[in-house]
Image: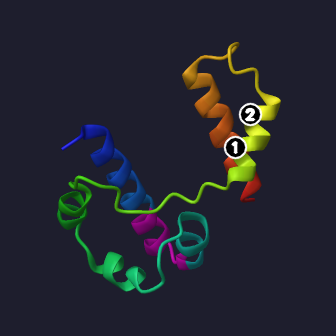
Amino acid sequence: MNENLYNLNLDYLLVAKELIAAGEDHKAVFYLGLPPDAISILRQMSIKRIRELARSDCLRFVPRINPNHWAEFMATQSVNADSNDQRAKALMMLLVNENR
C-alpha cells in the first residue's frame, strides 16, 4: 500500500465527513464530487472505519480535473522556471478559485 495514496484517500474522506457533520452536505457533493447516496453512509462511519476504507490500492474518489484548467495553467506558467511544488500550489489555487 502506497502511503501517499492512503493519505489522499484519508484526507478526502475526512474532509467529506467534516462537511457532512457541519450540515454542509451540498458542499461535499459539489466541491468533492461525493455521490449523494454516500452521505448517509459516511455520516455514520467511525474514524476507525474511515481509516480502514482509506487503505486501498486505488483512489476512493474520482478527481474532477478539467482539461481546460490544465491548458490555462500551462499557458500562464513557465514550466522550467518553477519547482514542481510551486507549480502544484499554483494549480491548486487556480482550481480552488475556479470553484468559488
Q: Quadrant of residue 74?
A: top right
The magenta segment is 16-25
Q: Which label sits on residue 74? A: 2
**10 Å neighbourhood of mark 1: few (<14), some, or many (≥20)?**
few
> Quick check: 86 left or right of 23?
right
Give the amino acid type for the residue marked by disc 2 in the picture.
Met
- The image shows residue 5 at horizontal and vertical percentages of 31, 45
Left or right: residue 17 versus residue 72 is left
The residue shown at (74%, 37%) is 73
**Which residue is situated farthest in the top direction here?**
81
The answer to if 21 sits in the magenta stretch is: yes
The dominant secondary structure in magenta is helix
Residue type for callout 1: Trp
As measured in the structure, the alpha-carbon distance from the residue carrying label 1 to the one carrying label 2 is 6 Å
Q: Which residue is mark 1?
A: 70
Give me the residue at 79% from left, 42% from top: 72
- Label 1–label 2 contact, CB within 8 A: yes
Q: Is residue 59 above or below residue 27?
A: above
